[in-house]
Image (cartoon, rainbow, N blue to C red):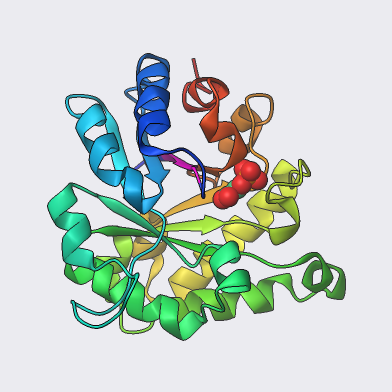
Amino acid sequence: MARRKIIAGNWKMNMTPSEAVALVETLKPLVQNEDVDVVFGVPAIDIVPVVEACKGTNIAVAAENMYFEESGAYTGEIAPKMLVDAGVKYVILGHSERRDYFKETDADINKKVLKAIEHGITPIMCCGESLEQREQGITMDFIRQQVKIGLQNVTADQAKNLVIAYEPIWAIGTGKTATSQQAEEVCKGIRQCIAEIYDDATAAEIRIQYGGSVNAGNAAELFAMEDIDGGLVGGASLKPDFGKIVCYNK
Ligand code: PEP
C-alpha cells in the first residue's frame, strides 16, 4: 500500500489573526492537490479563525504545541480538548525550537503524544540531530533515542496513524537543505527503528516527513525518495511558494 503524502506548513510565531486569514485566502487555491494531505500548523491564537477560513477546503489545521494535562492550573497552556473543540486535527510536537528554547524533553513529548492520541489528534512528532551530532557520527543513535522515548506506550495500531517529521536542526531556517540522500538515509533509519519497536507492517504505514529548508525548487526531489512521505515546511509555508511545494508532482 502506497503511503499518502502529507505536506504541512509550520507558521511558527508569525501571522496575526487577520494576517492568518488573509494568508489562507491567498493559499487556498494554490494548495489543491488530491494526492496530498495538506496541513497548516498555526499559532494558537490563529487556530479559530484559520479553521473557519479553511472550512470546505482540503486544508486541515495543526496546533504547534499542546499540553499533556486535561485542564487546570497551567497558566498559558492549551489543553487537548480545546484543540479538538476548535477543529484541530494535528499537533506538531517536539519541534527542535521547543526542545531548545523551552527545554522540552523526550519524556514530555511522549506524554503529549499519548494525550494527543487519546483525544484523536494526530501528532506530528519531530526529531532531528544537531550539526555537532552529525559531525560526531551519532545522528542515528540520537534520533533512535528520540523516537523510542517519544513513542513509549504507544501501541502499533496507534503508531500507524502517526506522522514523524525528521528535521535536522542544522537545516531548519538556515537555507541549508539536507541532500535527498542524507534525508532518505535518516528517514529509512527511522522506519527501521519503527520496525524494531513494532513490526514491518507498522513501519510500512507510518508517514515520515522531511523538514529543513524545503522550498519549491527541492521539494520534488526530496518527496520522490522512497522513505520520505512529504514535508514539514517552515519559512516557505508563509508564501505562495507553498502551493508549488504542495503541488510538487503536477
Ligand atoms: C520548521 O520549522 O519545521 C522548518 C523546517 O523550517 P524551515 O522550512 O524554514 O527550515
Query: Residue 193's x, y, as percent?
Result: 52, 72
The residue sitting at 39% across, 79% down in the picture is: 110
Secondary structure mostly seen in magenta is: strand
Q: Taking 147 as reference, is 122 above or below it?
A: above
Query: Residue 25's x, y, as percent?
Result: 35, 19
Of 75 and 203, the residue lying toward us: 75
Q: Taking 117 as reference, is 1 above or below it?
A: above
The residue sitting at 53% across, 20% down in the picture is: 240
Which image quadrant: the N terminus? top left
Query: Residue 77's x, y, as percent?
Result: 33, 70
Does the magenta-highlighted stretch encompass residue 8? yes
Quarter residue 107 falls in: bottom left
Of 45 and 208, the residue lying toward us: 45
Side of 64 where 78 appears, left or right: left
Quarter residue 48 falls in: top left
Residue located farthest toward the left when viewing the structure as drawn: 85
Magenta-colored span: 6-11
Q: Taking 72 as reference, is 127 above or below it?
A: above
Answer yes or no: is residue 151 visible: no
Report how many numbered discs are placed on residues in the image: 0
Side of 34 where 93 appears, left or right: right
Answer yes or no: is residue 152 visible: yes
The residue sitting at 73% across, 51% down in the picture is: 171
Residue located farthest toward the right when viewing the structure as drawn: 135
Does the magenta-highlighted stretch encompass residue 248? no
Query: Residue 250's x, y, as percent?
Result: 49, 14
